[in-house]
Image (tube, helix red, strand yellow):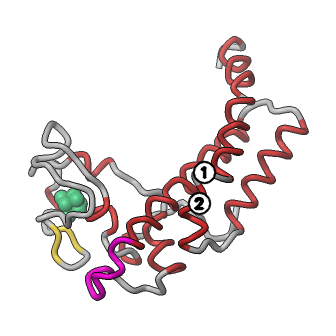
């Protein structure tokens, strides 16, 4: 486990990336439709104007959502604290980097969770190696854009291969 937990979300160091990048549909989780790349109409600066009453206003989906620290990491590490609101030209690259970093952090979360499986030593070493590569790397926007067609595929193949341990755990009564 790294000293600073990469998966800890800190909205105060983000630029409301989830509130612009993500799409949602009107329904039980969201009160209206929103397209990807469209700033939410409840957004003011980097703050949600209904943050204290999201569920009552029909947005439990926002309460449930967690980017696993991807947003703050993108803003701070890749864009030096800048925001698409100050410079609209950053909107697209920030959204793309956010998308890639979410995939990185989702796999970090899964690789950590796999530590609870009874992996043999070789598979556990592979798990640790992938985890170190994801946690210790300082990503560029270009690398994040390539992540899903490169390293992410290797990791997903590894996940497929360790499914047998999940079955073993279940049959053992886990
Ligand atoms: S309702 Fe608030 S938290 Fe949800 S997307 Fe809009 S601004 Fe963000």
The residue depicted at 36 percent of the width and 71 percent of the height is 92
Q: In x, y percent, where is residue 93?
A: 41, 73
Q: In x, y percent, where is residue 170?
A: 65, 16
Asked whether 132 falls inside the magenta stretch, the response is: no
The residue depicted at 23 percent of the width and 48 percent of the height is 24
What residue is shown with label 2?
A: 146
Q: Quadrant of residue 144?
A: bottom right
Query: Image height check: is 78 above or below 130?
Result: below
Asked whether 88 falls inside the magenta stretch, the response is: yes
- Magenta span of residues: 84-92
The residue depicted at 56 percent of the width and 56 percent of the height is 105
Q: In x, y percent, where is residue 117?
A: 73, 32
Query: Image height check: is 69 above or below 155?
Result: below
The residue depicted at 69 percent of the width and 26 percent of the height is 163
Query: Image height check: is 89 above or below 97?
Result: below
Query: In the rendered image, which quarter contains the C terminus?
Result: top right
Query: Residue 170 or 94: which is nearer the viewer?
Result: 94
Q: Callout 1: helix, strand or loop?
A: loop
Q: Quadrant of residue 72?
A: bottom left
Looking at the image, the residue that sits furthest to the right is 121
Q: Residues within 10 Å of mark 2 (few under 14, many from 20)?
A: few
Query: In the rendered image, which quarter contains the N terminus?
Result: bottom right
Q: Is the residue under label 2 in contact with that under label 1 (CB below 8 Å)?
A: yes
Question: Left or right: where does residue 133 sit relative to residue 20?
Answer: right
Q: Residues within 10 Å of mark 1 (few under 14, many from 20)?
A: few
Distance between mark 1 and mark 2 Cα atoms: 6 Å
Ligand 1 quadrant in view: bottom left
Q: In x, y percent, where is residue 102?
A: 49, 57
What residue is shown with label 1?
A: 149
Q: Quadrant of residue 167?
A: top right
């Amino acid at each position: 486990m790294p000293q600073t937990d990469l998966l800890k979300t800190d909205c105060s160091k983000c630029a409301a990336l989830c509130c612009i990048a993500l799409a949602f549909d009107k329904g039980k989780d969201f009160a209206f439709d929103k397209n990807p790349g469209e700033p939410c109409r409840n957004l003011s600066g980097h703050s949600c104007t209904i943050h204290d009453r999201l569920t009552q206003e029909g947005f439990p989906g926002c309460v449930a959502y967690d980017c696993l620290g991807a947003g703050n990491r993108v803003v701070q590490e890749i864009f030096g604290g800048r925001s698409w609101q100050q410079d609209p030209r950053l909107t697209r690259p920030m959204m793309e980097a956010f998308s890639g970093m979410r995939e990185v952090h989702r796999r970090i979360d899964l690789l950590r969770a796999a530590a609870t499986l009874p992996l043999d030593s070789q598979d556990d070493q592979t798990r640790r190696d992938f985890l170190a590569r994801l946690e210790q790397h300082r990503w560029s926007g270009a690398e994040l854009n390539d992540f899903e067609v490169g390293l992410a595929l290797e990791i997903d193949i590894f996940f497929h291969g360790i499914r047998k341990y999940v079955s073993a755990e279940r049959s053992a009564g886990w």
